[in-house]
Image (cartoon, helix red, strand yellow):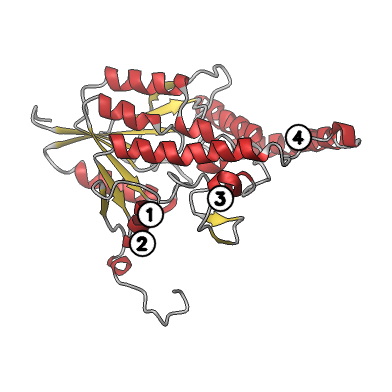
Amino acid sequence: MSHSSYRILYYNWDPYFQKPMQGGGVSIYCRNLIDYLTHQDNYQVSFLYSGMDYTFLSRHPYIKQVPNQTHPQVPTFSLFNSPIAAPSCFSFHDPVGNIQNPGLEKCFQQFLAEQEPFGIIHFHNLEGLTANCLKLAKESGAKVVFSLHNYWAVCPQVNLWKLESSPCSNYFEGRACAACLPEKVNVDLELNVRKLNHLGSFLGQDKQAPTLRIVRNLYKEFYLKIWNKFRSLTTSSPLKRQLELTGTELPQRAGLYRHRRQEIVSLINRYVDVALSVSERTTSIYRQYGVDPGRLTTQYIGSKATQFPVPTDSPLS
């Protein structure tokens, strides 16, 4: 690698080189992009992911280099034990955590300081990290690129889809967000399964290994039986039931979601050099929600069919 090589760090919450690939089209795009650049003489690419790997032995976040069989020549790193689990459904009910987390950010900042300076840091999303990482990336001296593959920056559910049933055109200053996904996902169960996966890797067991699959299934069955029994005990009396969101609590929760949207948009406008939007429609929506038009540019990915407008008489319009 020549001394004039341009160093790029790509971030995506999903490790695109592992099976099953969970990040959909974004992960495929990352894989193809990295594959292309690794065949160019003047680029040196590194890859970071977060919010997926957890350990039983430590709860503190740390970054460690991990093997990447798809691109062995690409230095690949995982941020273990991220307090912001990925994807976004696991942190929907932590709007402030989407903005900032001192422990995670200290870990990320130390990683940037230990690496040779990156010319570009390209975030394909911020799930698994915090929006404050945009600031840290910019302060490291890199040009910061943020691909707006979805609406995470303005919607903790990422798709601007209210109650999974209709488009969200008004979040009512955060009040609609507070009641959008009332059912919490079982984060503890998911993280413990991920810890089992990591433990299995120490024993040479791939995630898809039959033995590890059996252990995971037995654990899930055991956990859910204990969990359901606990829930039946705690909800047997109205006095023991978990408090639901009340009218008096709603303004406070709404304020957190309002703050989330405003602060993330502000961080984009202050620290992102280029915000890449995947369609003109997405660009228009982000402009509507306050992202600086001077930073927004449309970058189509995938099929060129996405560049063609949908006819007005189409049932899809």
- Residue at the (34%, 21%) spot, across then down: 109
Q: Residue at x 49, y 53 (%)?
A: 159
- Check disc 3 and report the residue beneath it: 172
Q: Position of residue 74 (x, y in %)?
A: 27, 34
Check disc 4: other Cα within 10 Å, few if <14, some if 14-19, many if 20+.
few
The residue to which callout 1 is attached is: 288
* Separation of residues labelled 3 and 1 (CA atoms): 15 Å
Measure the alpha-carbon separation of dots 4 and 2: 46 Å
Horizontally, residue 286 falls left or right of residue 122, namely right
To which residue does mark 4 refer? 222
Secondary structure at badge 3 equals helix
Residue 188 image point, x, y percent: 65, 31
Residue 21 seen: no
- Which residue has dot 2 on it? 281
How would you rate the neighbour count of disc 1 (Cα within 10 Å): few for under 14, some for 14-19, many for 20 or more? few
- What distance separates the C-alpha of mark 4 from that of mark 3? 41 Å
Q: Residue furthest bottom?
A: 313
Q: Are marks 4 and 2 in contact (CB under 8 Å)?
A: no
Could you tell me which quadrant the C terminus lies in?
A: bottom left
Q: What amino acid does circle 1 point to?
A: Gln
Point out the tag, 3 or 1, that comes first from the N-terminus.
Answer: 3
Residue type of the residue flagged with mark 2? Arg
Lower sequence index among marks 1 and 2: 2
Label 4: state its secondary structure. helix
